[in-house]
Structure formats: structure tokens, C-alpha cells
Image (cartoon, grey):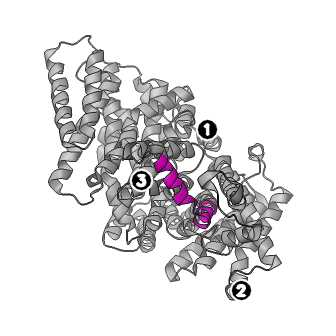
Amino acid sequence: MTTNEEILSQEKQQELLEKYDPEAATRKLAGKMGWIVFFGLLAFSVFQLYTSIFGVLTAQLQRSIHLGFALALIFLLFPASKKNIRSKKVAWYDLLLAVVAVAIGAYWPMMIDELVNRVGRLTPMDFYIGLAAILLVLEATRRTVGLPITIIAALFMVYALYGPYMPGFLAHRGLDLESLVQTMFFTTEGILGTPLGVSSTFIFLFLLFGAFLVKTGVGQYFNDLAVAVAGKSTGGPAKVAIFSSALQGTISGSSVANVVTSGSFTIPMMKKLGYRKEFAGAVEAAASTGGQLMPPIMGAAAFLMVEFIGGGITYWDIAKAATIPALLYFTGIWIMTHFEAKRIGLRGLTDEEMPDRKEVLKKIYLLLPILIVILLMVSGMSIMRAALWSILSTIVVSAFSKETRIGFKDAIDALVDGARTALGVAAATAAAGIIVGVVTKTGLGLKLANGLLDLSGGYLIPTLMLTMVAAIVLGMGSPTTANYVITSTIAAPAIILLGVPDLSAHLFVFYFGIIADITPPVALAAFAAAGVSGGEPLRTGVNSAKLAIAAFIIPYMFVLSPQLLMIDTTWTYLIWVVFSAISGMLAIGAGIIGFWMRKLYWWERVVGIVGGIMLIYPEGMTDIIGLGLFVLLVALQFLIKDKSTVKPNTAN
């Protein structure tokens, strides 16, 4: 096993998180201000739990209070500049902004009768409170999730104000400033819209669920279980990283956080066994990014999808539909790392390096809360109730052993940690609400969808490719939640207009928004992994994109063949589609890595890649051609002798 000295220190992990994950770059407050923030975070969680147990308040009240809590705590915790992260004092202007944020959060509860009676007619006080809310949301978003999404939200508002001056089909009659403020803060179509509504209900509770799971030590257990299952296989530590990250994705909605936490354990193991720094980091980055795609608890944007698609679709419908694509994604990375390990002759872990499997299996009960949340959602229970019961089940299950037991202090810490994690999501969804409000008010969504169709000539594949590029570019500077909101309101309608099912179109933009984290030149998850491995960042990003090649193919598969999402299909057809997809990924993996049972000639690599693409494309003739090329490639492994002998790498 990897020694404690080889595993990244907590301090180093925090440095990497602060560098690559804006949501982790907070002040380390102490003294009275530390206690104020502590109790503020605790009160935030208590409010969310209270309303989820006794009934959610009306939309404006629930969302405005949620927003007030989040904004006030953001200005106390997140400095205006990263240079002040180490400061233990809050600047006077941040205290002022926090006070204004409290006033914004309290305005709707205090004035609700008057606001309802006025029905959109704003007083000067309404106008200034609404304007302050917009400005504070933009600044809070900049501090927590970065500048790109802040600029995008601001540009959308400029578009709303200056509509008559826009060129061509983008022109509209425009809004005056008062109308814009009224839409943004005094309706449920702007800041207090659906994205923030989902943040103030479903997402917050599942973040709390994740915080309680962490307190049981389930994160470390995922690592131990992964080692016990995959450690002895060829290139074991790389497969441990894949398996562990798939499990970690159930409690972490952040690719960067997943990389730093599980990567600090798996990357040193891979390097010790002989993997190159860049490849070791790439494996962890690709696997960690896939965590948000892994049911039952996917990235926060999946909860938004429930509201955006509508039509009676449930979160379980989305999780069920995402199951096969997620498994194919991790299978693709597993295949690629297996071939790489065979190519350079890497061994698995020895018996001495393996954990005691009996001891690992003794803690299998730690997975019960995850199983419970699946069963509750399958039974038809609401998302909020399923999350509440899952939190309770985590506390009960933790009591099975003294070392995992959640005491009173641990429970309080989990409530505080969960609220802290929710701050960035609240800011991102509030900013996303600004974008949705402008799109709704100006009709921009339909205009851009029609423009996209004109640009692609009305053909599906070019439309998908343009949408993919847009989602990846947006994802390079935006959190997944905001990225999904933008692409689902602008690009997804264009795909749907071409006859694609709503769920396929929304999952398509969801996937590409996530894998932006491993797509150069701005691949934050890969750069964080390079910080752990010591490798070159851009090369790590290129390797991670290569390993996750399946992620660039699978979304096209389930758009062209919605049966992969278990939509209107039979088990016979589904089994064939999965078989052909896995066979295709085997062939593509061998072609890209250049190794299968032996080192491949260049023309064999071409056969593998072409055959793999044919198998993955869901159409009868391409499947037949692809299967023929696949059989040919397998036969060539036996007919042609080894070009070279690969000696096992026993480096320690």
C-alpha cells in the first residue's frame, strides 16, 4: 500500500483546491467572526431542513431567504481577491455587502403582502433593493465560481437593455432598467427562478447527505473497497482510481474536489507502480470527472434537469437513463488504462500491498445509505423526502461501529460543511436565473435555436457538433450547473426541433458541459491532477481527453439511439447496443493505445479505430461492418507474432 508520506498532505490538498476550484478559496476566519460564520452556516442548514420537513415556503420566500443566507455568507467567507485568502479578517466593505445581502434576503418575507398587491409596480425602494440584488449576485458569482459565468450573465443583461440595437435576428424591442430589475428580482423568472428554486430544495439536501456520508469515513472506504476489488489486476492502481472515483462521484459534485481527495491516494500508487506522471494524473482526472455522470446522485445540474424537461419526468427517470452511458464511460477508461498497463508491462499490487479484504467487507454497511436513496427514489418518493430519509439512514448506519459513528459534534460539523458547499451552487444558480430570465423575456432561446439550425443546415450531426463545441467552451469557465442552464435553454431546443427526445437532448448538453473539465486548453480537473502528480498540466489534459474518448462518443450514441437511455426499447435490443458499444470501445482503445494482446502495427490501429466507430454508431449496416473489422482485429492478434516482448515493470 501507499505510505502516508506519499499521500498528499491536507495542506497541499487545500492549496490545490484553492488554486483550481474557486469554491474552495475561502478565508480561514477565527475569533468572533469565525463563530458568526459558523452559526450562520448552521442556521442556513437548519432553515433548509426545517422547510423540507414541515413544508417548503412559497417560491419567493423560500428562494429569497436561501439567497440572502448564501450571499451574506459568501461575502464573509470569500475575499474580493485571492490574495486575501490567508487573511483572518473580513474587510469593512465585505461586512457592508453582507448586511445588504441580509436585507435583500429579508425583503420578500417582510414586504410580501405589499409586493403581491402592487403586482409589478415598483416603488423606489423596490427598485434599489432589486438592483442591489442583481449586483450582489454577480459579485458573489465572481468570487465563488469565477469570472466567465459572471461576464456571460452581465452580457445577457446588456442584451436585454439594448435589444433594438442588436444586429439581424438578435434584435428585439428591449427592456428599460426598471423592467429588467422587476423581472430579475420580483418575479420567478429571474434570480428567484427555477435554478435557484432547485438549489433551495433538492440540491441543498443532497449536499447535506454528502456531508454526512463524509463524516462516516465513506470516502476512505471507497478507496479501500476499490483496492480490494481491483488492486491485484494488471495496472491495478489505475483501475483503483477509476473504481474509487466512480464511487466518490456519489458524494462529490466537483471534478476538482474529487481529483484532489481520491487522487492524493491513487496517483502516488500509480506513480510507484511505473505509470508516467502525466498518465497517472490523466487517469484520475478522467475518472473523477465522470463522477458527476454516475447515478444515483449525479451532478447538481441533473436536479435542474427535472424542472427544465418537465412533463412529469422524475429524477429517477434521469438517473435510470444515465446509468448505461455512465457505465460505458467508465468502461472506456478502464479499457484504455488496461491496454496502457499491458503495453508498458505494469503489474498489479502484491499481497503485501493489498488491504485485508475481510476487514474491508466488514464495513460494507457504509454503502447502505446510497442503496437506500436508490430504493426510495425507485419507490416513487419525492426527491426531498428521499434525501431526508437518506441523511437519517446515514446517521443510523454510522452507529454500527464506533469508528464510523456520527456524534452530536460530527452532525453539527456536517450541517456546517453542507451549507458551506452549497454557497457556490446558490450563487451559480442565481446567476443562471439571470440568463434564463433574459432568454424568457426576449425570446432569445428560440432565436438562437433557429440560428443554430440555419448554421447547421438543419442536419442533426452538424447541429450536435456545434452544440458540443458550445457546451465545452462554456464549460471551460463555468460550473456545470450554469453551463447546463445556458445550453439547455439555447442549444437543446435546436436538437429537440430535429425530432430528438427531450431527455436525450438535455443529457447531451449535460455530458459535454461536464467533460469540459478534462478538455484542453482549460482542463481544470486535469490541471489539479497535474498538481498532485507533478506532471506537466497541458500534457495531462491531453492524456485525460484521450482516455475519456468514450465521453466524446457516447452522447452521440444516445441521441442517435435513445434506446441506450432505456427509452422505448426491448431488452434484446438494449443488450445488443451495449455489446456493440463495449466492443467498439475495446477496438478504439486498442487502436489509440497501440496494444491489445501485443503491440499493434499502425494499420491495425486504423482498423481498430474505424471498426470501433462503426460498432458504436447505432445502425444495422455500420454494426455489420464494424463487427467484421472487430473480428479481423482479434484474428490478427493470433495470426501475427509479437513484434516485441514486453517485460513486466516492477518499479517501486
Q: Is the residue under label 3 in contact with that under label 1 (CB below 8 Å)? A: no
Q: Position of residue 65 (x, y in %)?
A: 65, 74
User: Around disc 3, counting alpha carbons within 10 Å, would you say few (fewer than 14), some (14 to 19), or many (20 or more)?
Assistant: many
Q: Is residue 445 magenta?
A: yes
- Amino acid type at image mark 1: Lys
Range covered by the magenta-colored residues: 432-454
Residue 409 as seen in the image, left or right of residue 570 = right
- Name the residue rendered at 34%, 50% in the picture: 559
- Above or below, 174 relative to 588: below
* Nearest to N terminus: mark 2 or mark 3: 2
Residue bearing the label numbered 2: 118
Q: Which mark is residue 495?
A: 3
Residue bearing the label numbered 1: 12
Q: Quadrant of residue 73?
A: bottom right
- Amino acid type at image mark 2: Arg
* Nearest to N terminus: mark 1 or mark 2: 1
Mark 2 and mark 3: span between their CA atoms?
Answer: 40 Å
Mark 1 and mark 3: span between their CA atoms?
Answer: 44 Å
Residue 400 as seen in the image, left or right of residue 434 = left
Dominant secondary structure, magenta = helix
Q: Position of residue 133 (x, y in %)?
A: 73, 67
Q: Position of residue 21 (x, y in %)?
A: 61, 45
Considering every residue shown, the one lying at the far front of the view is 168
- Amino acid type at image mark 3: Ile
Q: Position of residue 320 (x, y in %)?
A: 32, 59
Q: Nearer the viewer, mark 2 or mark 3?
A: 3
The image quadrant where one finds the N terminus is top left
